[in-house]
Image (cartoon, grey):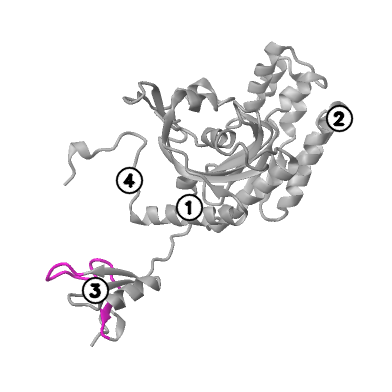
Amino acid sequence: MTQPTDLLPEGLEDRLPAEAARITAAMRACLDVLGAHGYDRVRPPLLEFEASLVGRMAGVSVGERSSMFRFVDPASLRTLALRSDMTPQIGRIAATGLAAAPRPLRLAYCGDTVVIKASQLDPARERLQLGAELIGSDSAAAAAEAVMLAVEALQAAGLTGISVDFTLPDLVDTLAEKAFPLAPEQVEAVRRELDTKDAGGLKVAGGAAYLPLLYATGPFAEALTALREVDAGGALKSRLDGLESIAAHIGDAARITLDPTERHGFEYQSWFGFTLYAEGLRRAVGRGGTYRIAGSDESATGFTLYLDRLAEAAPQPEAAPLVWLPFGHDREAAANLRAGGMRTLAQLADGEDPRAHGCTHILEAGGPALLGTQA
């Protein structure tokens, strides 16, 4: 019977067996792919000193930083915070415990994150975050490895119709330096109008020269051609060549699009960013790109997958047969069944119905038999 106190806080929910099984299967499949490519898993703590977390969150908005749960540690009397993102923790590990490790350093992670308040578009306040970070390189080759690794992980999780949307997070800053000069106070206004795809607002903000960027979007080949025509004085040549090499590395593994002015979710990325989508899901299933680690200023490339979200489109894993173990069953035989991949359920009281518990087989003297066919 449900009690008023059984209600969960807004943005938090239980994961019942079928959904939990999908999430777990997707997590294992993704981590197996990362491990197979040489990414070693690390497990940072769920909470740590607030100053450490915030100090590694360069480029993240004040609003996002203030979304962390905070409280005073009774042992140290310092402020602790629950992580809202695991990426800053990976940067801390790379800069401290693994500072002497050879570069590039490949690390994988998976864990829960929480925020005080979520957005209307994504009301979840607890997320299971999985990702990989390539520390020590932000080259086109590193970016190509990260994108392809993310695509392979999604495929291993059973997702189909995968597409990748490329962006250039520092595009306005790069063009504003020489090609299309802007006063410092104009830069943010031009970024904002490009984000909203507002041609009129862009002109008013003094960014008329940036108008062609609004139309250099869509399927990768066509959008890249249009963007090359915008490249006054070769300011973007190296970046566009990099995009082309990344796309060539992906090949036909995913559909590729380009939206060079997209900045939502790429507040701390440098020259390259990408968003991952999959068939059957309206929202993005992952995001990544190149960046600099705050505090150490080391270059890095990585991505994050939103496991709870992608599990919505992942196939339901096939459950192993569940074998009923009646009173007096052969324990060694039952152990052998479990070692062979079957699941067992032991009888605890008279009158229990194995079918009601989902059992498909029963252990007999000759081994497991289908329920209803035993002698």
- Percent across and percent down for residue 94 are 58, 37
Q: Residue furthest right?
A: 233
Give the quadrant of residue 159: bottom right
Q: Which residues are magenta?
A: 347-365
* First of labels 3, 1 by sequence position: 1
Q: What predominant SS class does the magenta segment belong to?
A: loop
Compute the Cα span from label 1 to label 4: 17 Å
Compared across the picture, whether 294 is left or right of 185 comes to left
The amino acid type of the residue labelled 3 equals Leu
Residue receiving disc 2: 234
* First of labels 1, 2 by sequence position: 1
Q: Which mark is residue 27?
A: 1
Q: Is residue 348 magenta?
A: yes
SS type, badge 3: strand
SS type, badge 4: loop
- Percent across and percent down for residue 30 are 53, 53
The amino acid type of the residue labelled 4 equals Asp
Q: Nearer the viewer, residue 167 or 215?
A: 167
Residue receiving disc 4: 14
- Percent across and percent down for residue 182 are 75, 15
Above or below — where is 2 with respect to 119? below
Q: Are marks 1 and 4 in contact (CB under 8 Å)?
A: no
Residue receiving disc 3: 325
Task: Inspect this view and state whether residue 242 appears.
Answer: yes
* First of labels 3, 4 by sequence position: 4
